[in-house]
Image (cartoon, grey):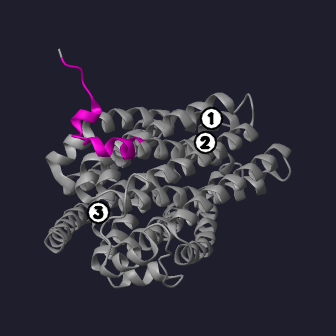
Amino acid sequence: MTSFSPLKSLQVQSHERAALLLGFVFHFCVLASYYLVRPLRDALGLEGGADKLQWLFTATFVVMLVAVPLYGALVARLPAIRFVPLVYRLVALSMLAFGVLIARHDAPVLVGRVFFVWISVYNLFIVTVFWSVLVDRFSNEQGRRLFGFIAAGGTLGTFIGPLLAATMATRLGPVALTIAAAVLLEVAVRCYRALLSRTRPRNLTESEVGASHRFGEEGRSMGGGVLAGVTLILKSRYLQGMVLFMLLHTSAATLLYFEQGRIVAESFSSVATRTQFFAYVDLTVSALTLIFQLLLTAPLIRLIGVSGALAAMPMATLIAFAAMALAPVPASVALAQGLRRAVEFAIVRPGREVLWTVVSREEKYKSKNVIETLVYRGGDAASGWLSVGLTSLGAGFGLLALLIVPFAGLWSWLAAWMAERQEDRKRDAERSHP
């Protein structure tokens, strides 16, 4: 009897193994650090009342308006080998500072709200930077085979993070959580540097190839303006499709999040019990996702293609809306969100990242960041106010569940269109670099 090997099922070549495992550990550290503090963020965010969440989402978007140009300036002026570690280490320092503030119990509502906003800003940056590195260092063909396994490293992090949070929240307090998160981010930096020595940038444009010969692949900055990511999007229908896909995704997720907040606020009275509940939801998501990623993601993407992988998101969203509308209780929240997020992380995210393997290096680091931070949080803010407006007009969550149906149809069509454009770009790249 032969034993099952995930690496063998992925058809991993010998020269890919070190980079694959480094990507796995890198992703584990990034998401474990975030999921250590995510339950605390969600619990503190409800301290001022679930009816104030739309203000927190709006504040997050405003802060993102400032953060994205700052990030753009870093990318334009520093080579990736310098700005990637800088981003992670600045976040680690901020985590330690917040741990002290929360432990002091000074102005807990204010500190909790600022913490909620900052975590909501930084988590998108550290994840987006990670995937920018991955789609820069792995080819389109490698992404189809390997991104599911690398994503499983992040899923393991989303399992270990909330598990530690659930056990440490009432025993050691926030300082321990933030210290652990900071240490994991430093390990992520070490993984990134090791990954650079085992891979090289992919899909360089002619100008990028010339610059790499003059300055070395890792030692040059990308140049361009602070808002180059935005201008690149305006010039590309492909990137505009990614913007629309992201807006549909984040709008649906935010509407579900607001309903989740209302149900949890009514069901649990203390920060500790809310933190524990959110941690258990994250554990459910992580367990389901890890099983899918190790056993199903790679063969499923080969079977249904990138189009089918992307279309799984609107289908899972419809199921989640229906479940929470029919049974608005904590158990349905856990099951509905668990299924939706497991499908997102295990199937949709690897498929979505494959879309980025066929764009230029500048688009990977600049436009990708704009879409997955500014556009994402802009959709959050708009959807938050939409939820509040519909509620004030007397519209219940059941009506939202009906309204989401036509949007899910548009979403599925867009998934097929994006996958087709990705194949076109892939064929063009193969003809240009046989």
Count of labels in the image: 3
Q: Amino acid at mark 1?
A: Ala
In contact (CB < 8 Å): disc 3 and disc 2: no
Residue range corresponding to the magenta coloring: 2-21
Q: Is residue 270 visible?
A: no
Kindly identify which residue carries mark 1.
165
Residue 33 in which image quadrant = top right
- Foreground: 430 or 100? 430
| Among the two numbered marks 1 and 2 on one chain, the one whose residue lies closer to the N terminus | 2
169 over 258 or under it: above or below: above
Residue 394: image x %, image y %? 49, 60
Name the side, left or right, on which 1 lies relative to 58: left
Kindly identify which residue carries mark 3.
355
Residue 296: image x %, image y %? 25, 37
> Callout 2 environment at 10 Å: few (<14), some (14 to 19), or many (20+)?
many
- The CA distance from mark 3 to mark 2 is 31 Å
Q: Amino acid at mark 2?
A: Pro
